[in-house]
Image (spheres, rainbow, N blue to C red):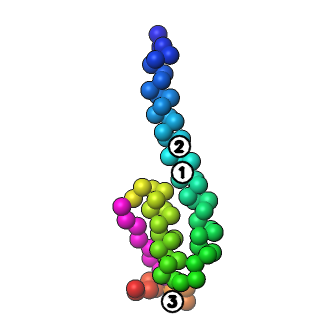
Amino acid sequence: MSTHKDALPYTRSRLVQLEQRINQLETCSKAPSLINSKLNLSNLLDTIMNVPKKVMNADACSLLIVDEATCVPQSS
């Protein structure tokens, strides 16, 4: 039989998960305004890469920029 004490650790764990998810969604919702506020391409690309990096709690992130006319990746 399950007791209230047995449910408490699950509740705390679930609360931590929900708080992390809220933080991820808040970060994602801020992305469009951050992107629109950048005029410098280098700063813009840094901003674009920091959002998914933060949301996914990653150490690094990469971005492949492709030339629309040739469909060839651009070199940095």
Instruction: Name the residue located 48 percent from the left edge and 81 percent from the top edge.
Output: 42
**Is residue 61 on the magenta stretch?**
yes
Instruction: Name the residue located 48 percent from the left edge and 22 percent from the top edge.
Output: 7
Is residue 18 or residue 64 the one in the foreground? Answer: 18
Task: Calculate the distance from the C-alpha at mark 3 to the C-alpha at mark 1.
Answer: 38 Å
Look at the picture and state if 62 lies above or below 20.
below
Q: Amino acid at mark 2?
A: Glu
Q: Residue furthest top?
A: 1
Look at the picture and state if 35 lies above or below 40.
above
Q: Amino acid at mark 3?
A: Thr
Q: Secondary structure at mark 1?
A: helix
Task: Calculate the distance from the C-alpha at mark 3 to the C-alpha at mark 2.
Answer: 44 Å
The label number, if any, that marks residue 70 in the structure image: 3
Q: Are marks 1 and 2 in contact (CB under 8 Å)?
A: yes
Q: Secondary structure at mark 2?
A: helix
Which one is earlier in the sequence, the residue at label 3 or at label 2? Answer: 2
Mark nearest the camera among 3 and 1 is: 1
Crowding at label 3, few (<14), some or many (≥20) Cα neighbours within 10 Å?
Answer: few
Q: Amino acid at mark 1?
A: Asn
Q: Which residue is mark 2?
A: 19
Q: Which residues are magenta?
A: 59-66
Q: Secondary structure at mark 3?
A: loop
Q: Position of residue 38 (x, y in %)?
A: 58, 78
Look at the picture and state if 67 lies above or below 44.
below
**Quadrant in the picture for the C terminus:** bottom left
Q: Is residue 16 visible?
A: yes
Crowding at label 2, few (<14), some or many (≥20) Cα neighbours within 10 Å?
Answer: few
The label number, if any, that marks residue 23 in the structure image: 1
Q: Position of residue 46 (x, y in %)?
A: 47, 74
The main secondary structure of the magenta stretch is loop
